[in-house]
Amino acid sequence: MTNCPNGQLCIAGLGPGDPELLTLKALRALERADYIFAPCPSATRPSLAASIITAANPALEGKIIKLVFPMSANSSELALAWQEAEETIAGYLLQGHNCVFATEGDPLLYGTFSYISPRLAGRINELPFKYIPGISSPFAAASATGLPLTLGEDKLAILPATCGIEQIEQALGSFEAVALLKVSAIYPRIISLLKGKGLLEKCSLVCHASSPQQQIISGEEALKNICPPYFSILLIRSKKDE
Amino acid sequence: MTNCPNGQLCIAGLGPGDPELLTLKALRALERADYIFAPCPSATRPSLAASIITAANPALEGKIIKLVFPMSANSSELALAWQEAEETIAGYLLQGHNCVFATEGDPLLYGTFSYISPRLAGRINELPFKYIPGISSPFAAASATGLPLTLGEDKLAILPATCGIEQIEQALGSFEAVALLKVSAIYPRIISLLKGKGLLEKCSLVCHASSPQQQIISGEEALKNICPPYFSILLIRSKKDE
């Protein structure tokens, strides 16, 4: 085993869903890899990452190993799942296999791999991991609308609505552009806040950005009357001087 | 001429510099286009966008039309340049050519096309423009460091340092991650601010992210003693509980 060096691990962002939004670099890394790790919410549910990969190149299906990253707030359940993922990856790397861990969007913006990277790095200390950035959903949403996020000296805030209505209000007060993720949980409160600030006419809600189900909602009435799906981004131009 | 419909215009993000960070979608749009518009700072200076395109596919060189977008604060000089760019593009579209306007990074995050899109849309009102998102430099910089920008309920602020030291201080106070662009103009003041807040050890300066000249600087002494080039991104993790 001393003659078998560790395999390398590359963490690649796959983009928001449209397989054409893969970068050339990510696709080549996937094609060169011996194995590809794809996160999924449970053993029985499909992996969005795996579906992007196989849509880009169906021949890659046989290399994919699904890893469970539960959508859970239970810390011991999460710790167990992360430990299992970490052990699986370490096992393949220590056997000398070159692997890619594939993440939706960008690997370092709310990316699943970041939960296991510190401990995994401690076990596999021969080579640093390589990262390939990916298109993240706020940018896919902006492209869907065609409206500028920022120009000149504008500032952009990207935040999950789960951080609380006070944080959202603060961001709207000081940033010219705000991209809100995970809006579904407190959507009525967000709409009420935006209405109070006269910002509803400066919003676009983009559901399933870049996928065939993509939908863009704007206008006060339409925004009030939708129940947004989980994969929704609310883009708000809060610039005062427009 | 009534039988010759307008050509279509697609605005494609080329990513931060590495031609491998083009998306499959952007490359295909460039390859299918009759003409490609690439912004450059003056008629005699090279276009970074054009260099990314020809590095990805040298055969595309013959289609490229450079458009001057001056790096100037003079509003009449800018207005004249934008009008010229707008007229050039409109001319090609009205002749029925399908064109791509190529931008570095993402087209809607500080993208040059946004300065001319409203008036151009008014002239070419048959078809909406299509946008293709691109990897922007803060995400290329994060991938260079391998350090997470955001996890869980963290918030990310992206801002140009030219917006002023007070705005930077405010963002550092309320966001767990801050990506600062255009740091070279007021770099010593930024370093002084970060030192005062005990954040210098939580910073990485990434110069020329994704290019062969890429350089990552961290650690108080190294950060203090560099004079960063224009294409530099300062990533700061200001999270209190780490």
Image (cartoon, coloured by chain):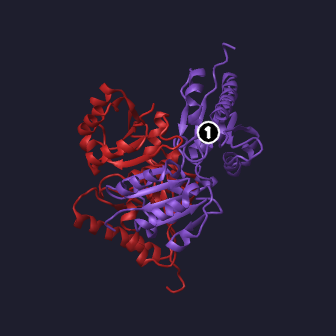
Chain colours: A purple, B red
Residue B210 lies in quadrant? top left
Residue B113 visible in the current orientation:
yes
For the point 54% across and 42% down, which residue is it? B152
Q: Is residue B119 above or below residue A154?
A: below
Residue B240 lies in quadrant? top left
Q: Secondary structure at mark 1?
A: helix
Quadrant (top left, top right, bottom left, bottom right) of the C terminus of chain B: top left
For the point 67% across and 29% down, which residue is it? A89
Q: Chain of mark 1?
A: A
How many residues crowd mark 1 within 10 Å: few (<14), some (14–19), many (20+)?
many
Q: Which one is in front, A121 or A74?
A: A74
* Residue B128: % across, % down: 51, 72
Q: Amino acid at mark 1?
A: Ala
Along the horizontal axis of the image, is B101 left or right of A4? left
Along the horizontal axis of the image, is B64 left or right of A116? left
Residue B64 visible in the current orientation:
no
Q: Is residue B165 above or below residue A100?
A: below
| Farthest top residue in view | A2
* Residue A138: % across, % down: 51, 54
* Residue A175: % across, % down: 37, 55
For the point 50% across and 65% down, which residue is it? A204
Along the horizontal axis of the image, is B141 left or right of A231? left
| Farthest bottom residue in view | B2
* Residue B13: % across, % down: 48, 55
Q: How many marks?
A: 1
Residue under pointer 1:
A29
